[in-house]
Structures are given as C-alpha cells and as structure tokens.
Image (cartoon, rainbow, N blue to C red):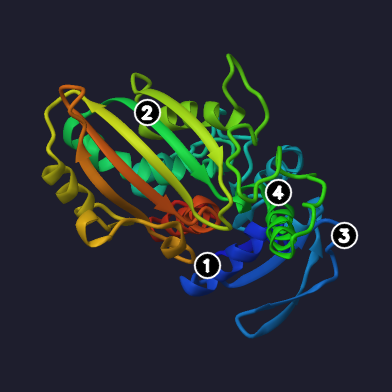
Amino acid sequence: MLPSVAVVGATGAVGEIMRQVLAEHQFAFRAIKFLASEKSAGKPIDFLGKKHQVELLRPEAFAGIDIVLSSTPASISREYSPIAARAGAIVIDNSSAWRMDPAVPLVVPEVNADALKKIPKGIVANPNCSTIQMVVALKPLHDLARIKRVVVATYQASSGKGAKALFELEAQVAAIGRGEPVPKVSVHAAQLAGNVLPHDWKAGEDGYSEEEIKMIRETRKIMGDDSIQVSPTTARVPVRIGHSEAINLEFDRPITPEAARDALRRAPGIIIVDDYAKGQVPLAIDATGRDEVFVGRIRRDATVANGLNLWVVADNLRKGAATNAVQIAEVLVQRGWLPKK
C-alpha cells in the first residue's frame, strides 16, 4: 500500500523545496497533508494541480501518517518528532535535534542507506547540508583507498541560514548598487555582500563553530568510521544558493587522480566536471536546482604520500536538505522498511 505523507514546516524555505522534489520525483502516496505553525495554518498551497490548506501542527495531525518529512527548528522537532513517531510514522527530520543520538540513524542514501534497517525511535536524521555533499564524494574514495584525514574549507551560500538571510543579502546588494548605505545587519554575523564571513555560526568548542563540529561528528557517524580525522573551516560567501567545498584528503593506500575520477564517475548521485584547461569545473550557479553532487579539480597532493584535492559543489536546499530527505523516504518505500500497519 502506498504511504500517507505529512510535510511539517511546509511553508518554509526547505518545505517549499520538499514539495517541489516530491513532485519532480513523482513520489507515490495515497494521501498527503501539509503542516505548519499558527502563523501559516490556513494558507492555501498548490501541489500537483490541487489546492491544499495548510493544517496546524498538532499531535492529532499525525493520525494515520506513515512518513513525516519535517523541517522545523530543533526545539520544535524535539517536541513533535517523538509525537509523530508514537503515532506510528517514520519521521525524517531535517533539524539538528537528533543527528548525534545513537538510537537515530543519520543517513545519506548514497552512503549508508542500510542504516535505515533499524529505526528504534521512529526517527531518521537528515544530516547537515555541508556534511551531506562532502560524504557523497568521500564514500567511493574511502571504499577505494580508506581515508585517514579530511581537511575541508567550505564556501557556504546565504540561503543556508534561511530565507531571511537571503533577503538580507539581496537588500545589501541592492543598496550597494544604488550607492546607499547597507541596511543594518540582523541575520548574518556581519555584512555579507562583498564579504566572506568565517564566523556566521554559533561558537562551539576550542575555537570551532557549531557548523564545523557538526562536520566532524556527522562525517564519522555517517561513514561508520570514528578513525577518520576531520579538520573543517566553514565560511559564508555572498552566493544565493549552492555550497562549495575545497577538500584535501589523505589516504591509507596509494590512489591516483585517474582512479579517483573513475570511482566517483561510477558512484550514485555524483557528476564529474573536471577539465580545468577548458574551464569545466563545478560551479555553485550550475548546481542550483540540481539534486546531484558535482565534483572536479581532482588532483594529486604532492605534500603527502597518498593525497588528493577535490572541489565539491551542491545545491544546499536540495541535496543539502529537501532532496536527501525525500531520497530517504524513497528508500524506505522501495525496500519495504516502513512499519507494517
């Protein structure tokens, strides 16, 4: 039987993309509903040619639901995801609330889909956007030569901080274009237009940002290897959509750029764009609106025995959030791993 689906946070930036991806992927369901806070409840939504009214997020809304695709702040998730799970649904949660819970699988389908075989709490965590695109690129290389160490610098789009951040960037760009003072900053850590922000996240431990700590911990959990050393530096750049990452890898065994390129080309969810001489490299603007992870600039690092450098780009709202969640739902349905009712 086809699943009944609820999209929580349906009117937010990721929720809107979630609806698009469900439609594009032709995800089959017997019923669907859209849930949000009091602010958005009652609003009309067009989905697959039909009008739907956004319903209020409340415990009763999960009755009869098989799959919940949730994109809410972590505080809301901590309250409502367990309620949905107790009602019998599998919750695919896009917040940070459950990612490091040992009883909650943290899943990128191209990397560790088998983790979905056991979902003790009825909750599956969707990883952080910057982690998702990185591990998609790392997995085939780890299988080939075993990664010892990852040094990554991210160049993350404004939209990673939500719709309000994107509006703030656009207002700054418009003001600069008119020769006017930039409006007061309220979302990003500082003016983003014409700038790069290495401090656009909450402070974590030992001088690292929370975003950097997420990349360290989530990578190890998803890859299933606590021995992988991850050294990240995250930065926000004045780009609307699309995170870019410069990744340096050190391996246990010898690996050539040609072998890496071949392994990546054969891996699911990856598109190789790698002819520097012809200007063919992954660009954020080209990844926008796409579900794949783009990899290029694959080259040897001559400073270590077994080293490579990569440039990895993906749409942070799609593969970094909505698409990954929908892909998890697709795996659950295709492999028959939804709870029997």
Which badge, 2 or 4, comes first in the chain's sequence? 4
Residue at 36% from the left image edge and 47% from the top image edge: 312
Mark 3 vs mark 2, foreground winner is 2
Q: Residue at x 82, y 56 (%)?
A: 37
> Tag 4 or tag 3, which sits nearer the N-term?
3
- The answer to whether residue 112 is above or below residue 291 is above
Q: Secondary structure at mark 1?
A: helix
How packed mark 4 is, by other alpha carbons closer than 10 Å (few <14, some 14-19, many 20 or more), is: many
Crowding near pointer 3: few (<14 within 10 Å), some, many (20+)? Answer: few
- The residue closer to the viewer here, 234 or 339, is 234
Contact? badges 3 and 4 (CB < 8 Å): no
Using the image, determine if residue 21 lies above or below residue 120: below
Looking at the figure, which quarter contains the C terminus?
Answer: bottom right
Q: Amino acid at mark 2?
A: Val
**Label located before the other in sequence (3 or 2):** 3
Q: Which residue is mark 2?
A: 151
Q: Residue furthest front?
A: 179
The amino acid type of the residue labelled 4 equals Thr
